[in-house]
Image: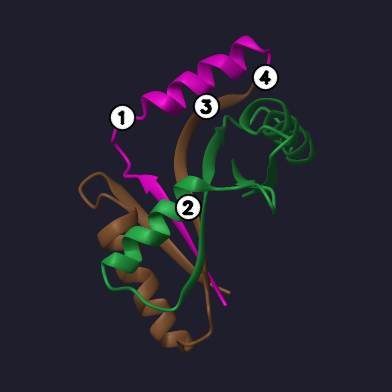
Chain colours: A green, B brown
Amino acid sequence: MKAKVYVTLKQGVLDPQGKAIQHSVELLGYGGIADVRQGKYFEIALDGTLAETEAREAANRMAREVLSNPIIEDYRVEIE
Amino acid sequence: MKAKVYVTLKQGVLDPQGKAIQHSVELLGYGGIADVRQGKYFEIALDGTLAETEAREAANRMAREVLSNPIIEDYRVEIE
């Protein structure tokens, strides 16, 4: 089983890294881009000792307590 | 329209950052974790001047040429 955690900056939080990427790709000739925001992505492989509900709960707790900064970031967890 | 790009290290490429996260969460008492790998996640907002097929093609090109290092990384593009 695998948990996928997506961490993104909250709306309204400035993302200078995303802005730098947007500026660079525009210089490289890509058009039609309104905004770029960068986030983080974690793949957590689980060893199968946890049931799906426990795994989901553990992944959510991990995302909230370790992988994201809840002041400025949102997270999303998927279990596969 | 939004393009979401997920960049992950190829299988077999060492991920010291993921290993450090795994070690930390284990010290914090989380169990049942076999492996952690960190990737990158980009949300590209498109301004609507591109049709969906063009947007997909542009996002794929951007992912390949700018957002990932194809030697060590894989990417996946979703258009929403």
Q: Are marks 4 and 3 on the same chain?
A: yes
Task: Give the chain letter at badge 4.
Answer: B
Task: Give the chain letter at badge 3.
Answer: B
Q: CA distance from mark 2 to mark 4?
A: 32 Å
Amino acid at circle 1: Leu
Q: CA distance from mark 4 to mark 3?
A: 11 Å
Q: Are marks 2 and 1 on the same chain?
A: no
How many other residues sit within 10 Å of disc 2, few (<14), some (14-19) or many (≥20)? some
Numbered circle sitting on residue A18: 2
How many other residues sit within 10 Å of disc 3, few (<14), some (14-19) or many (≥20)? few
Dot 1 or dot 4: first in sequence order is 1
Q: Are marks 1 and 3 on the same chain?
A: yes
- For residue A53, side relative to residue A79 (left or right): right
Percent coordinates x, y for residue A51 in the rendering: 74, 35
Please give the residue where the numbered disc 3 appears in the rendered image: B34
Nearer to us in this view, B36 or B42 = B42
Task: Give the chain letter at badge 2.
Answer: A
**Do residues under tags 4 and 3 come within 8 Å of each other at their CB atoms?**
no
* Segment colored magenta: B1-29
Please give the residue where the numbered disc 1 appears in the rendered image: B14
Q: Secondary structure at mark 4?
A: loop
Percent coordinates x, y for residue A1 in the rendering: 59, 41
Q: Nearer the viewer, mark 1 or mark 3?
A: 1
Amino acid at circle 2: Gly
Numbered circle sitting on residue B30: 4
Q: Are marks 2 and 4 on the same chain?
A: no
- For residue B4, side relative to residue B62 (left or right): right
Q: Secondary structure at mark 1?
A: loop
Nearer to us in this view, A27 or B35 = A27
